[in-house]
Amino acid sequence: MPDLGERANVMGPQPRAARTSVPPDLLEAAGQVLDLLAAGDLNTLTKLATPAAAGELDQLARSIKPGLYSRHQLIATARVNYHYYVKARLFGERAEPFTVQYRLGQIDGRWMVWEAMDLSGGKTAWTR
């Protein structure tokens, strides 16, 4: 077998990073965003969004009729560097479930929405 040089550079199984728990304040912020979406409170929602995400979040909120959804469920969270992706579903008694995914990151110790997208009504790998 040829000499591969530095053995640390050889392709193969890589060590996995240690598991981290989701910060409780992130879960609280995620729930607050869902409550504001369900209530249709656009003013407060835009205060929780970065300027780049304000348009996406505004469009998402306008697609939901205020008061139609009464509860929410977090489906999944994923961490990428210092940002968390949250996939959640809103439920109402007389409405089809509404699935949403958004990315939260901190600015000055406060969780802000960096991007948001509607996953309802489509058939993709993200809508399960």
Image: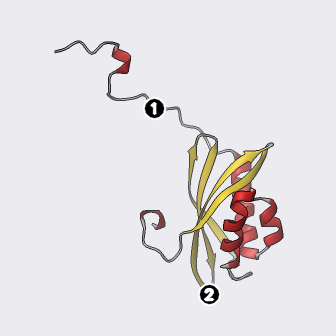
Kind of residue indicated by mark 1: Arg
Q: Could you say whether the residue bearing mark 2 is in a helix, strand or loop?
A: loop
Residue at x 53%, y 74% (from the top left corner): 120
Residue at x 42%, y 63% (from the top left corner): 125
Mark 1 or 2: the one toward you = 1
Q: As drawn, which residue projects farthest toward the left?
A: 1
Please state the horizontal and vertical placement of residue 23, each as a whole percent of the image.
68, 44
Residue at x 61%, y 41% (from the top left corner): 21
Please state the horizontal and vertical placement of residue 109, each as a whole percent of the image.
79, 43
User: In terms of depth relative to the viewer, which is nearer, 67 or 125?
Assistant: 125
- Side of 74 relative to 122 (left or right): right
For disc 2, the marked residue is 94
- Side of 60 relative to 111 (left or right): left
- Side of 4 relative to 84 (left or right): left
Q: Quadrant of the N terminus?
A: top left
Q: Is residue 41 above or below residue 82?
A: below
Please state the horizontal and vertical placement of residue 35, each as a whole percent of the image.
74, 68
Q: Quadrant of the C terminus?
A: bottom left
User: In terms of depth relative to the viewer, which is nearer, 121 or 76?
Assistant: 121
Kind of residue indicated by mark 2: Arg
User: In terms of depth relative to the viewer, which is nearer, 95 or 124?
Assistant: 124
Number of numbered discs overlaid on the protein picture:
2
Q: Is residue 56 above or below residue 14?
A: below
Q: Is residue 32 above or below residue 94?
A: above
Residue at x 65%, y 79% (from the top left corner): 63
- Is the residue marked by circle 1 packed among few (<14), some (14-19), or many (20+) residues within 10 Å? few
Q: Could you say whether the residue bearing mark 1 is in a helix, strand or loop?
A: loop
For disc 1, the marked residue is 16
Q: Is residue 29 above or below residue 97?
A: above
Q: State which quadrant residue 88 falls in.
A: bottom right
